[in-house]
Amino acid sequence: MLFSRHFRKAAPPAEATTRAEYRACDEIGAITRPFSPLVGELLAVYCHTRPIGAFSQTEHCRDEYQMTARQIIHHILEGWQNQTGGRGTIDDLLLRPRQSRS
């Protein structure tokens, strides 16, 4: 599903959304189309990955988690390499790039 189609619906009022009904994407649900499809998809990934830390505290599926996370990271790195003419690395995308080991 394309990001722009997903966000055409207006977000429900904050008081109408209970904790059980909360979806991470409700926070930016009012955004219709201010971004390109590429940035829209990145925002969708951001929204859908926010609860992973909480889920990982109660669910234990280490092998599946690692396999799926690697695939997601591969897709993101592929996009970054396309954006940088093949010069981009995973280190460019880290919050704190790794220091050289020399």
Image (cartoon, rainbow, N blue to C red):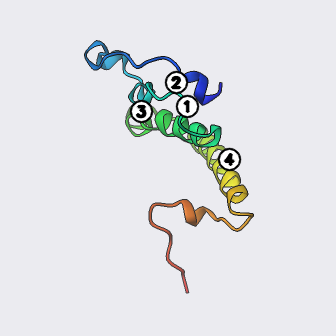
First in sequence, mark 1 or 4: give its number. 1
Amino acid type, mark 2: Phe
Pointer 2 residue: 7
Contact, mark 1 vs mark 2 (Cβ under 8 Å): yes
Residue 96 relative to residue 15: left or right: right
> Which sits earlier in the primary sequence, circle 3 or circle 4?
3
- Eyeballing the image, is 20 above or below 4? above
Name the residue beneath numbered marker 1.
33
Give the residue drawn at x 60%, y 22%: 5
Q: Are marks 3 and 1 in contact (CB under 8 Å)?
A: no
Q: Residue at x 43, y 30 (%)?
A: 28
Q: Position of residue 81 (x, y in %)?
A: 70, 59
Kindly identify the amino acid type of the residue bearing the numbered disc 3. Phe
Reading the image, the residue beneath label 3 is 55
Residue type, label 4: His
Spatial distance from mark 2 to mark 3, Cα to Cα? 24 Å
Disc 1 to disc 2, how far (Cα)? Answer: 8 Å
Vertical arrangement, residue 16 with respect to residue 75, above or below: above
- Tell me which residue sits at (30%, 20%) in the image: 19
Q: Secondary structure at mark 4?
A: helix
Q: Considering only order in the chain, which callout, 3 or 2, is on the residue closer to the N terminus?
A: 2
Residue 75 image label: 4
Quadrant containing the N terminus is top right
Q: Secondary structure at mark 3?
A: helix
Query: Compared with residue 87, is residue 78 higher up or lower down, i.e. above or below?
Result: above
Which element carries disc 2, helix, strand or loop?
loop
Q: Nearer the viewer, mark 1 or mark 4?
A: 1
Q: Quadrant of the C terminus?
A: bottom right
